[in-house]
Amino acid sequence: MQAITTMSASSLIPTTEPRFRVPDARGRFGQFGGMYVPETLMTPLLDLTKAYDEARRDPAYQQAFADMLRDYAGRPTGLYHAESLTKHVGGARIYLKREDMLHTGAHKINNVIGQALLAIRMGKKRIIAETGAGQHGTATAAVCARFGLKCVIYMGATDMERQALNVYRMRLMGAEVRGVEAGQRTLKEAVNEAMRDWVTNVRETHYILGTAYGSHPYPMMVRDFHRIISIESKQQILRAEGRLPDAIVACVGGGSNAIGAFFEFLDEPGVRLIGVEAGGRGISKGEHAARFAGGRLGVLQGCMTNILMDGEGQIEGTHSVSAGLDYAAVGPEHSYYREKGRLEFGYATDTECLDAFQMLSRTEGIIPALESSHAIAHGVKLAASLPKEQVVIINLSGRGDKDVWSAARAMGTEIKL
């Protein structure tokens, strides 16, 4: 495939209306999405929408984004034919899109670079972010260090305990990490605290939201910044196989890596696009984070989408062995494409995730993030059911260094140094 240096920078971010003409001017993906925020945030969100629309049409901004993706993040990432994994499971040929090879260890840095450049363009010198698994927080801390921006990261106290390595990495790079003790002490509560901070300090602060969720324009922006995943993989699979894949599989929490991996294939009806949610301990109340398996339509933290909540609108508890998928809602664009019949969704349980975590480590010498392990679990089952001449791409959204301690503990082993 051609490197980004030979690709038109203006092709990395859409400058015209995307596929299916979404979102509309109100930030709606059909009935999903929108801007459900306090009045105090409407003006900054409208200002952000205007600033982004101007930036994505500016060749200088586009080029700066392309340059940072190449020189700082490490794009393009490889599309790796996992021959040993394919042989182990049988069936279709499996390829891994290696987002785990990016600087800081996950796809998250694509979006952080795009938003940080936008914040600088808007004159914002203070950055806040939320994080669950810590990969978005780590990417944010890194890019803020690179540009000399003040950085505050909100993280649930439970997630800080299970992702202690990433907490240290963020602090090492100069970020202030603020633990959140409210509620379940996980990602939803971290988002709440970040939004409270933004309301208070909106004049000098930009909120780098980490997934394709929240109020407009965030789902659109985050999708656009991650679109590079499918731009590359489409070119790479054509070069490797001479045709498009039969299926693409990606894990879905808020849905940023998945929408990035799917976007360039939306108009390819022969390619199945499959999102994998966190099945936790099983699909019963409070034991999972599979919104399409047990959720309903509602509004949470800025947009309308599928949410795990009861009949009275109270948000239900969630659980996943993976901190990054442990969230009660899913990005509105995913809900829209599912309603249109373009995206399929399944789930993997904690046990299946941990089995996949070990399987990829032992067959390919690649330790996946627990989030990505959900996609591996579902992807290998799919591959095993397909003929050998078919092709499946699994988006390996992050590496598992951060998860070794948590995975070991979940499998009954305590690591002693």
Image (cartoon, grey):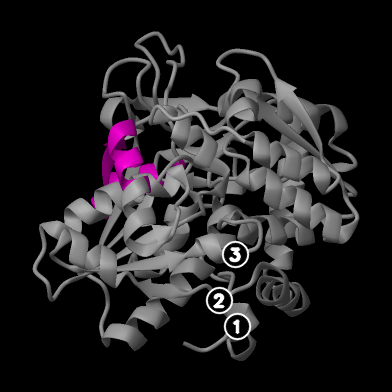
Question: How far is the residue under mark 3 from the one under mark 2?
Answer: 9 Å
Marks 3, 2: nearer the viewer: 3
Q: Residues within 10 Å of mark 1 (few under 14, many from 20)?
A: some
Residue 342 within the magenta-colored segment of the rendering? yes
Residue 95 place in picture, x, y as percent: 32, 69
User: What residue type is disc 3 on?
Assistant: Leu
Residue with the most extreme front position = 417
Residue lying at 65% horizontally and 56% vertically, measured from the top left: 104
User: What residue type is disc 2 on?
Assistant: Pro
Q: Can the viewer see residue 408?
A: yes
First in residue order: circle 1 vs circle 3: 1
Dot 2 corresponds to which residue? 76
Marks 1, 3: nearer the viewer: 3
First in residue order: circle 3 vs circle 2: 2
Residue 158 place in picture, x, y as percent: 59, 22
Question: How far is the residue under mark 1 from the one under mark 3?
Answer: 15 Å
Provide the secondary structure element on which disc 1 rests: helix
Residue lying at 46% horizontally and 42% vertically, measured from the top left: 331
Dot 1 corresponds to which residue? 4
Provide the secondary structure element on which disc 2 rests: loop
Query: Would residue 385 appear left or right of 124 to someone viewing this image?
Result: left
Tell whether label 2 touches label 1 (CB within 8 Å). yes
Marks 1, 2: nearer the viewer: 2
Residues shaded magenta: 331-357
Query: Would residue 173 appear left or right of 140 to someone viewing this image?
Result: right
First in residue order: circle 1 vs circle 2: 1
Residue 339 place in picture, x, y as percent: 28, 44
Label of residue 102 in the image? 3
